[in-house]
Image: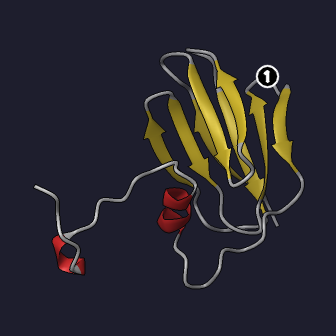
Amino acid sequence: MSALTLPLQPKEDTELVVEPWGQTFQLAAGERYVLSWLGSEEQPECLSTPTGLVVFMGTGATFNLQHESGAWIGGSDIPFPSLPPSMSTKEFLSMTGLIHIQPSESDGARREP
């Protein structure tokens, strides 16, 4: 199994949070980083936040964050277990407070005026 990678090059100092581990990293503006993962063929879900970027890895994945020079910054070799079959990634992120899902009129929810 080969590692899949996501190149990162922030234009300003950025906070990177890797979920579901909850690990936070500070990325410097203009520097190049590589986020790599094993154990999941799913492309990570990336969400912009006011403070930076949240990356949600697929279940069963492990990850590494390295500077382009090869210097190791952080990671986890402990795979995260899968979500319950009835829970989507967005529902999990909403439950943890990382994102807020607005109810839609099509799901029968009433909107407050």
Left-right relation of 113 to 82: left
Left-right relation of 92 to 84: left
Vertical comparison of 56 with 65: above or below: below
Please tell me which residue is depicted at 51% across the width and 30% down the height of the picture: 52
Q: List the single residue furthest toward the left.
A: 113
Scheme of colours in the image: secondary structure
Q: Quadrant of the C terminus?
A: bottom left
Circle 1 SS class: loop
User: Residue 64 appears at what percent x and percent y?
Assistant: 80, 43
Please tell me which residue is depicted at 75% across the width and 50% down the height of the picture: 21
Circle 1 residue: 69
User: Residue 38 appears at what percent x and percent y?
Assistant: 78, 60
Q: Quadrant of the N terminus?
A: bottom right
Q: List the single residue furthest toward the right.
A: 77
Residue 23, picture quadrant? top right
Vertical comparison of 89 with 66: above or below: below
User: Residue 42 appears at what percent x and percent y?
Assistant: 61, 66
Please tell me which residue is depicted at 78% across the width and 71% down the height of the picture: 81
Please tell me which residue is depicted at 53% across the width and 57% down the height of the picture: 93
Vertical comparison of 9 with 17: above or below: above
Q: Quick one: 4 or 45, which is closer to the camera?
A: 45
Residue 31, picture quadrant? top right
User: Residue 95 appears at what percent x and percent y?
Assistant: 54, 61
Q: List the single residue furthest toward the front.
A: 113
Q: Quick one: 29 or 26, which is closer to the camera?
A: 26
- Specify few, some or many for label 1: CA neighbours under 10 Å numbering under 14, 14-19, or 20 or more: few
The count of marks equals 1
Q: Amino acid at mark 1?
A: Ser
